């Protein structure tokens, strides 16, 4: 059996089309997929997704839907019609919402992967307690991961650090999409729970979401290739 090829997901965290296109022109779709989040999608809309597809990139549409089930179902159906590779919702919306999301994507001829956000990597125990979650952060992540799995989703978004206690408790085919990836020596502090690319792969990440280490690199193409080769 061929070895698993681990793909990097480059986060296009831009607010305008020109900057996003400039970076995309430097990236190789053989080495990565692309993530389009709220900021860029709000600024550019579905036309930019079509543009990325024309450049042979698979797209993770990272809009983190979280609303009443009917709204989420319709939003997921609309997102699926864009032909994206993967979309996400918040697991904290509950099982009825998660199942509605699944119904929405299944109306597409080619349903995307559907994953759920557990606990954002910017959050820590203190912030969880601030919003009324009194159990340990690790227990909350596991609880939401099991909720997503039980609702029929393909995987979760979580910190790579969470995989040390998640991997043995969920189905082997479950996907783990891990943001909070930083290079050795990077001390930026917008994420609480981070790992390097090779550390994340070793603990079981399926896909690594990487933003600034690539997008703010002096040579994004070279940095992407280096990470790709390191983790494969």
Image (cartoon, rainbow, N blue to C red):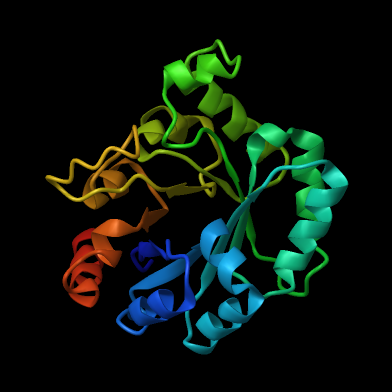
Please name the residue shown 26% across and 51% down the image: 197
Q: Is residue 122 above or below residue 133?
A: below
Res 23 seen here: yes
Which percent across, then down, holds residue 166? 46, 31
Res 37 seen here: no
Direction from residue 78 to residue 184 in the image, left or right: left
**Residue at the extreme bottom:** 54
The N terminus appears in which quarter of the rendering?
Answer: bottom left
Please name the residue shown 65% across and 75% down the image: 46
The C terminus appears in which quarter of the rendering?
Answer: bottom left
Which percent across, then down, holds residue 140? 55, 22
Please name the residue shown 22% across and 63% down the image: 227
Q: Is residue 197 above or below residue 13?
A: above
Which percent across, then down, holds residue 198? 22, 50
Direction from residue 86 to residue 138 in the image, left or right: left
Please name the residue shown 72% across and 68% down the image: 80
Q: Quadrant of residue 49?
A: bottom right
User: How many marks can you see?
Assistant: 0
Looking at the image, which is closer to me, 13 or 105? 13
Which percent across, then down, holds residue 64? 62, 49
**Residue at the extreme left:** 185
**Residue at the extreme top:** 134
Q: Is residue 213 above or below residue 66?
A: below
């Amino acid at each position: 059996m061929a070895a698993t090829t681990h793909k990097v997901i480059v986060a296009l965290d831009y607010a305008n089309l020109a900057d996003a296109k400039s970076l995309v022109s430097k990236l190789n779709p053989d080495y990565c997929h692309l993530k389009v989040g709220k900021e860029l999608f709000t600024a550019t809309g579905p036309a930019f997704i079509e543009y990325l597809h024309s450049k042979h990139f698979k797209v993770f549409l990272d809009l983190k839907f979280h609303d009443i089930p009917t709204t989420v179902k319709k939003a997921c159906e609309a997102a699926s019609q864009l032909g994206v590779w993967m979309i996400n919702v918040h697991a904290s919306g509950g099982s009825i919402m998660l199942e509605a999301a699944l119904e929405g994507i299944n109306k597409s001829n080619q349903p995307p992967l559907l994953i759920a956000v557990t606990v954002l990597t910017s959050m820590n125990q203190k912030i969880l307690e601030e919003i009324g979650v009194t159990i340990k952060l690790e227990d909350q992540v596991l609880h939401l991961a099991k909720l997503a799995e039980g609702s029929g989703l393909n995987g979760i978004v979580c910190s790579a650090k969470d995989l040390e206690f998640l991997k043995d408790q969920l189905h082997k085919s479950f996907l783990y999409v891990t943001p909070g990836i930083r290079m050795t020596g990077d001390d930026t502090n917008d994420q609480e729970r981070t790992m390097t690319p090779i550390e994340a792969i070793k603990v079981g990440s399926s896909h690594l979401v990487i933003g600034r280490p690539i997008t703010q690199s002096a040579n994004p193409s070279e940095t992407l290739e280096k990470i790709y080769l390191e983790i494969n």
